[in-house]
Structures are given as structure tokens and as C-alpha cells.
């Protein structure tokens, strides 16, 4: 959801996170990845303007940062 909201393709996010496109695909399918890999993807998304929203009774989520 975050990747699409930013208008990024799998290849673009993979390059930003310095991981393979296969890793992004596996992540989006919900496969388990190393914590450092998940952090690299999260950091790349945050650098592009994604804010991750913690559980607040309505579930976790993401939103795009206002600029």
C-alpha cells in the first residue's frame, strides 16, 4: 500500500532500499524476511514520505506525510 501510494514500482523501491526486486515481492506477499531487510524497506519508504501509524484501536496503517 505504501509503495503504490508513493507511485513507486517494485524496481524503484528495491533500488531505494538496496534490496532485490524479489525481496520486495516476497515482502509484499507476507513472507518472513530478516529484520534488517524489513528495516531497510521501512527506512526507504519513510525517506520518501510514508508515515507508519501504530495500532490505535483501528488497526495499524500508513499515510503520506504532508509537505
Image: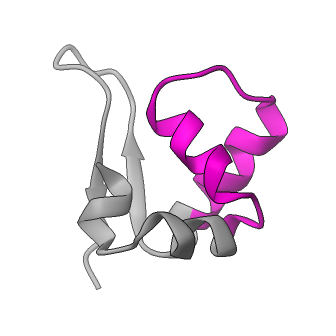
**Residue 8 place in picture, x, y as percent:** 39, 73
Depth check, front residue: 14 or 50: 14
Q: Colour mode?
A: one colour
Residue drawn 83% across the image and 40% down it: 36
Depicted 28 relative to depicted 4: above or below? above
Query: Does 39 lie within the magenta span?
Result: yes
Task: Give residue 26's quadrant in the image.
Answer: top right
Q: Which residues are magenta?
A: 17-44
Depicted 62 relative to depicted 67: above or below? above
Single out the residue that lies furthest toward the top: 57
Single out the residue that lies furthest toward the bottom: 67
Q: Is 5 positioned to the left or the right of 20 in the image?
A: left
Q: Quadrant of the C terminus?
A: bottom left
Depth check, front residue: 22 or 5: 22
Q: Is 59 positioned to the left or the right of 13 in the image?
A: left
**Residue 31 place in picture, x, y as percent:** 58, 22
Q: Is 35 positioned to the left or the right of 1 in the image?
A: right
Looking at the magenta stretch, what is its main secondary structure? helix
Depicted 37 relative to depicted 44: above or below? above
Residue drawn 66% across the image and 20% down it: 32
**Residue 56 place in picture, x, y as percent:** 27, 21
Task: Give residue 16's quadrant in the image.
Answer: bottom right
**Residue 51 place in picture, x, y as percent:** 40, 55
Query: Does 55 lie within the magenta span?
Result: no
Q: Is 53 positioned to the left or the right of 11 in the image?
A: left
Depth check, front residue: 33 or 48: 33
Tally of numbered tags: 0
Single out the residue that lies furthest toward the front: 22
Residue drawn 42% across the image and 72% down it: 49
Amino acid at each position: 500500500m505504501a509503495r503504490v501510494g508513493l507511485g513507486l514500482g517494485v524496481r524503484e523501491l528495491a533500488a531505494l532500499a538496496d534490496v532485490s526486486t524479489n525481496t520486495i515481492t516476497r515482502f509484499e506477499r507476507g513472507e518472513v524476511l530478516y529484520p534488517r531487510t524489513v528495516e531497510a524497506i521501512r527506512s526507504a519508504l519513510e525517506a520518501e514520505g510514508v508515515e507508519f501509524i501504530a495500532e490505535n484501536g483501528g488497526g495499524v496503517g500508513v499515510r503520506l506525510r504532508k509537505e
